[in-house]
Amino acid sequence: MRRLFASVSSPLRLAAALALAAWLAGCASAPGAQQAQSPVRVKVFVAAMFEIGQNTGDRAGEFQHWYERYWKDAKPIAVPGALGPVYCNADGVCGAVLGMGKVNSSSSMQAILLNPRFDFSQAYYVISGVAGTPPSRGTIGEVNWATWLVDYDLGHRWAPEENTAGAPTFMPRKGYEEYRRFQLNPQLVGWAMKLSADTPLKDADSARTYRLRYPDAAARRAPFVGTGTHMTGDTFFHGPGMSKQAQYIAKLYGADDYVITEMEAAAITLVIKRTHGTDRVMSLRGAVNFDQGSPGETTLQHLDPAPGQTAGGFAETVANIEAVGSRVVDHIVANWPQWQGGVPPLR
């Protein structure tokens, strides 16, 4: 630097030389400035599909309770290609709203997984949201861990009047075997149930009243934590005929009973499978509606109910989802040395 100053012959050159010297000194004293920012090592990633308004302070959608538990002080991390930002806390718990439907949610998940800001090499996933349930299998306010994820849409369908009366109008399409169904890690499902089955669940008076419309014992139950097959479809299907077809597909594929209808999990899981496998994937859904009307109610009436004729219990269900799921998230993080290498033996 002495040579540089010695050659200066004017105030302008002196100012330029001082600025250059300061810049060089800054580079020398901060070698880390030229190094890439270390990625966030994700321990658990929570995926929600939508939020109603803000992330906190108003009516809660699928993300708000998770956000208020884990990320109220977190700064959003923008991810090109994803619907919204990712939030992470100091414990390695991250989450985001991915969007509704298979394409919307899976494209967001892929953008997040491939972003260099995050290290997902040891991450667990909780795919979380609201859903429907057949009244013969579930009830409003219940929370359900998936044992299988089945894609409802991949196959051939035709109009019922073009078939033998009462016969199924669905046939699997060959070549889709590897991505039309996923059996989630039974040991991980077992852990999820062990950690969360006794979670106290909220209920609503409106849901209690609504359940009485249905004669099914399952539909009349109070909210509970269960397991079964989750059916993923972009079609928001309703009615006993479509529900019967969903159960038919689940059995055709060798899965467990169809208990949850939703719109994202199989697609998100396919994206995760291609990058990190499915051994650490969990799907958690809370039922906010039945997939068909009560006796004497047409499917159209069920789809477009009169004011005051909905099931109710939405606020309680989204609270139940987080209450159940956070038990598993907190256990994994608190016992990370036992979980980081893979799902430990179920004790």
Image (cartoon, rainbow, N blue to C red):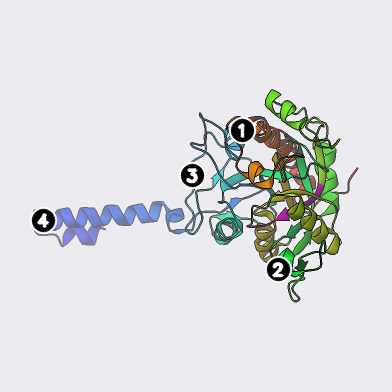
Tell me which secondary structure the magenta stretch mostly adopts. Answer: strand
The image shows residue 104 at horizontal and vertical percentages of: 55, 57
Mark 4 Cα within 10 Å, few/some/many (few <14, many 20+)? few
Q: Are marks 3 and 2 in contact (CB under 8 Å)?
A: no
Which of the two labelled residues, at mark 1 and mark 3, occupies the earlier sequence position?
1
Mark-to-mark CA distance, 1 and 3? 15 Å
Q: Which is nearer the N-term, disc 1 or disc 4?
A: 4
Any part of residue 313 in sight:
yes
Question: Does the CB distance between marks 1 and 3 fall below 8 Å?
Answer: no
| Residue located beneath label 3 in the image | 76
Could you say which quadrant of the image residue 324 lies in? top right
Marks 4 and 3 sit apart, C-alpha to C-alpha, by 43 Å
In the image, residue 297 lies at what x, y percent?
71, 40
Name the outermost residue toward the left.
10
Q: Earlier in the sequence, mark 2 or mark 4?
A: 4
Residue extent of the magenta highlight: 228-234
Instruction: Describe the element under mark 4 as helix, strand or loop.
Output: helix
Task: Name the N-terminal-most of marks 3 and 2.
Answer: 3
Most extreme residue toward the bottom is 175
Give the Cα distance between marks 3 and 2: 46 Å
